[in-house]
Image: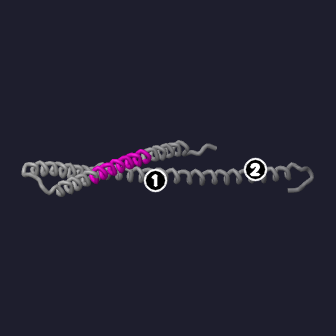
């Protein structure tokens, strides 16, 4: 016998599959955002390292003329600006893109879990329904067997009922 809620069961299965695909996409987007964050963090570290290295080199130069000192200050200022810009980009990415990717993944994970729960509830209902159908069929078979036994007793000539 066909399960009466088979079409709902199929819809729930499809919803669970879509939720699983959405979760996979969200996880991939989160991983990409984390890779980009790691790249930005590495760029910040490199820029800050370059700035410190250049400052150390310039400090070791003991005899610097006035105009060279101004050029060095401008150069170091550009390095500092580059490092600050990269730090700001990394912080902005962390606050916006990475946070959004993590939130989308969390929502997709929750939707997937809900879809799986809905599917499991319907599956349990289907199992209970099938068990009830088996019990009803068994009761029907027993009743038919009793009816046949009664009919045999009635059909035998010479016997009293």
Q: Quadrant of the C terminus?
A: bottom right
Residue 115 percent coordinates (x, y):
46, 50
The image shows residue 41 at horizontal and vertical percentages of: 30, 52
**Callout 1: SS:** helix
Q: Mark 2 points at which residue?
A: 144
User: Would you call the spot at circle 1 few (<14 residues within 10 Å), some (14-19), or many (20 or more)?
Assistant: some
Depth order, front residue of 72/139: 72
Range of residues picked out in magenta? 23-45
Q: Which of 38/69 is in front?
A: 69
User: Quick one: 52 or 143, which is closer to the camera?
Assistant: 52
Q: Quadrant of the N terminus?
A: top right
At horizontal 12% and vertical 55% (from top left) the residue drawn is 63
**Residue located at (75% from left, 53% from top):** 142
At 53% across and 53% down in the image, what residue appears?
Answer: 120
Q: Where is residue 35 in the image (x, y as percent from the top left)?
A: 36, 49
Q: Indicate yes or no whether the magenta region holds residue 37.
A: yes
- Which residue sits furthest right? 158
Residue designated by label 1: 113
Question: Which SS does the magenta portion mostly show?
Answer: helix
Q: Does the magenta stretch include residue 51?
A: no
Residue 90 x, y percent position in the rendering: 27, 51
Residue with the most extreme front position? 63
How far apart marks 1 and 2 lie (CA) works out to 46 Å
Quarter of the image where one finds residue 6: top right
Residue 132 in the figure: left or right of residue 141 = left
Near mark 2 (Cα within 10 A), the count class, few <14, some 14-19 or many ≥20, is few
Left or right placement of residue 48 versus residue 111 in this view: left
Q: Which of 32 and 125 is in front in this view?
A: 32
């Amino acid at each position: 016998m066909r399960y009466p809620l088979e079409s709902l069961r199929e819809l729930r299965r499809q919803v669970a599959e879509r939720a699983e695909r959405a979760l996979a996409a969200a996880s991939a987007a989160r991983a990409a955002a984390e890779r980009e964050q790691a790249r930005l963090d590495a760029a910040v570290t490199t820029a800050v390292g370059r700035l410190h290295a250049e400052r150390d080199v310039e400090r070791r130069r003991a005899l610097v003329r006035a105009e060279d000192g101004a050029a060095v200050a401008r150069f170091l200022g550009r390095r500092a600006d580059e490092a600050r810009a990269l730090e700001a980009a990394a912080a902005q990415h962390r606050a916006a893109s990475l946070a959004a990717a993590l939130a989308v993944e969390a929502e997709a994970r929750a939707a997937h879990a809900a879809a799986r729960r809905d599917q499991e509830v319907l599956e349990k209902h289907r199992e209970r329904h099938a068990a009830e159908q088996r019990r009803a069929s068994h009761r029907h078979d027993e009743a038919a067997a009793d009816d046949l036994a009664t009919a045999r007793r009635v059909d035998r000539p010479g016997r009293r009922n």
